[in-house]
Image: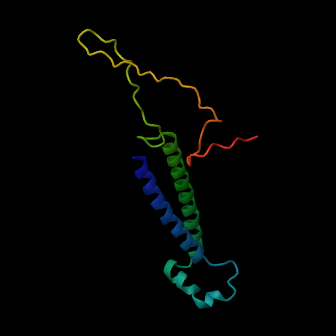
């Protein structure tokens, strides 16, 4: 549910960012420097003589929407990080085996424990190598 909200808000944030870029680029500079002759009249014919006021209001409102959406997406990611769902980021639950039951008269007896005889380590003086030659003594 929250991931759907984050996806929609992120998409809207991208659209608002593109809108802001276009509105800022469409604004007239404080000093035209002769650029008005090249196409400055197109904006006035589209929005009328109050073009600069309309574009500045659109910029302010777009910036407010951009920052509010950014904050909401941030809060969404904080919520997702604080509330992991499912098995993401958690260790698996491994059941502990039950203690062995005491054998009853009807149950078969447990197998006897295997004993391993303990032998002494071979003497290094009588040990031979793989080729059959006696092992060299190290000083």
User: Residue 22's spot in the image, x, y percent?
Assistant: 54, 73
Q: Is residue 69 left or right of residue 113?
A: right
- Colouring rule applied to residues: rainbow
Q: Is residue 45 left or right of residue 108?
A: right
Instruction: Mark yes or no: residue 36 visible.
Output: yes
Observer-nearest of 53 and 4: 4
In this figure, what is the number of numbered marks?
A: 0
Question: Which residue occupies 59% across, 45% down?
Answer: 129
Question: Which residue occupies 43% across, 36% down?
Answer: 92
Instruction: Give the answer, above or below, for where 105 lies relative to 55.
Output: above
The extreme top residue here reads 105
Question: Which residue occupies 54% across, 54% down?
Answer: 68
User: Residue 121's spot in the image, x, y percent?
Assistant: 59, 29
Image quadrant occupied by the C terminus? top right
Observer-nearest of 4 and 137: 137
User: Residue 4's spot in the image, x, y percent?
Assistant: 40, 52
Instruction: Give the answer, above or below, for where 111 lies relative to 52.
Output: above
User: Residue 36's spot in the image, x, y percent?
Assistant: 62, 87
Instruction: Mark yes or no: residue 50 visible.
Output: no
The extreme right residue here reads 139
Instruction: Give the answer, above or below, for where 107 lies relative to 93.
Output: above
Quadrant assignment, res 62: bottom right
The extreme left residue here reads 106
Question: Which residue occupies 34% across, 19% down?
Answer: 111
Instruction: Give the answer, above or below, for where 49 lies relative to 78.
Output: below
């Amino acid at each position: 549910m929250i991931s759907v909200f984050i996806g929609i808000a992120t998409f809207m944030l991208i659209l608002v960012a593109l809108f802001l870029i276009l509105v800022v680029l469409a604004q007239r500079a404080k000093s035209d420097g002769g650029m008005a002759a090249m196409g400055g009249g197109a904006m006035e014919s589209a929005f009328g003589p109050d073009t600069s006021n309309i574009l500045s209001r659109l910029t302010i409102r777009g910036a407010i929407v951009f920052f509010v959406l950014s904050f909401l997406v941030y809060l969404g990611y904080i919520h997702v990080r604080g509330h992991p769902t499912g098995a993401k980021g958690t260790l698996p639950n491994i059941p502990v085996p039950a203690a062995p039951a005491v054998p009853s008269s009807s149950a078969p007896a447990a197998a006897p424990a295997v004993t391993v005889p303990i032998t002494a380590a071979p003497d290094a003086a009588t040990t031979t190598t793989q080729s059959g030659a006696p092992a060299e003594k190290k000083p």
